[in-house]
Image: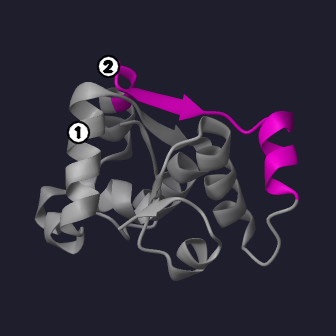
Amino acid sequence: MAITIDTHVLIWYIDKSLNKRLSGNAMAAIVEAEQNDIVYVPIIVLMEVLHLAERKKVSISFNDLINRIENSSNYVIIPFDITLLKIAEPLKGLEAHDRLILATALLTETPLITKDIELRKNGANVIW
């Protein structure tokens, strides 16, 4: 099953010392998608990881993460474009980055892997 991944989930998955923060369902979905399908990564997620890495809020290397994604056929970066913006526009009540992440899941028609309560309350297909 293909999935869309949220920022904190990507960080918790990549940094093995943080894997325990993932639910069993989330971990299983990511592993299955990474091995057998597609992990969609919204470009805003990578921007958030870059910001956190630059501020030393996470211990993962941004360059290592980008290399991992670029060298994997199972990761697909979804850019911010007019199509995504049109999907995000009606998603009221969320912060801009969350609207784009949810819009990516809607665009790709995949479940969103997130612990974010606001995204889970929005009626999206969420795995946690």
Q: Quadrant of residue 10?
A: bottom left
Q: Earlier in the sequence, mark 1 or mark 2?
A: 1
Amino acid at the residue labelled 2: Asn
Q: Is residue 14 visible?
A: no
Tell me the element at label 1.
Answer: helix
The residue located at (35%, 68%) in the rendering is 128
Q: Is residue 5 magenta?
A: no
- The crowding category of the residue bearing disc 1, from other C-alpha atoms within 10 Å (few below 14, some 14 to 19, many at least 20), is some
Q: Which residue is mark 1?
A: 32
- In the picture, the quarter occupied by the N terminus is top left
- Boundaries of the magenta span: 69-89
Indicate which disc residue 8 carries. none
Which callout, 1 or 2, points to the residue nearer the camera?
1
The residue located at (28%, 49%) in the rendering is 29
Tell me the element at label 2.
Answer: loop
User: Residue 52: percent from the left, percent from the top?
Assistant: 46, 63
Which is more toward the observer, 50 or 69? Answer: 69
Amino acid at the residue labelled 1: Glu
Question: Left of 63 or right of it: where is 49?
Answer: right
Which is more toward the observer, 128 or 64? Answer: 128
Indicate which disc residue 71 carries. 2
Q: Is residue 50 visible?
A: yes
User: Residue 107: percent from the left, percent from the top?
Assistant: 67, 40
Question: Left of 4 or right of it: where is 14?
Answer: left
Q: Quadrant of residue 114?
A: bottom left
User: Residue 112: percent from the left, percent from the top?
Assistant: 49, 55
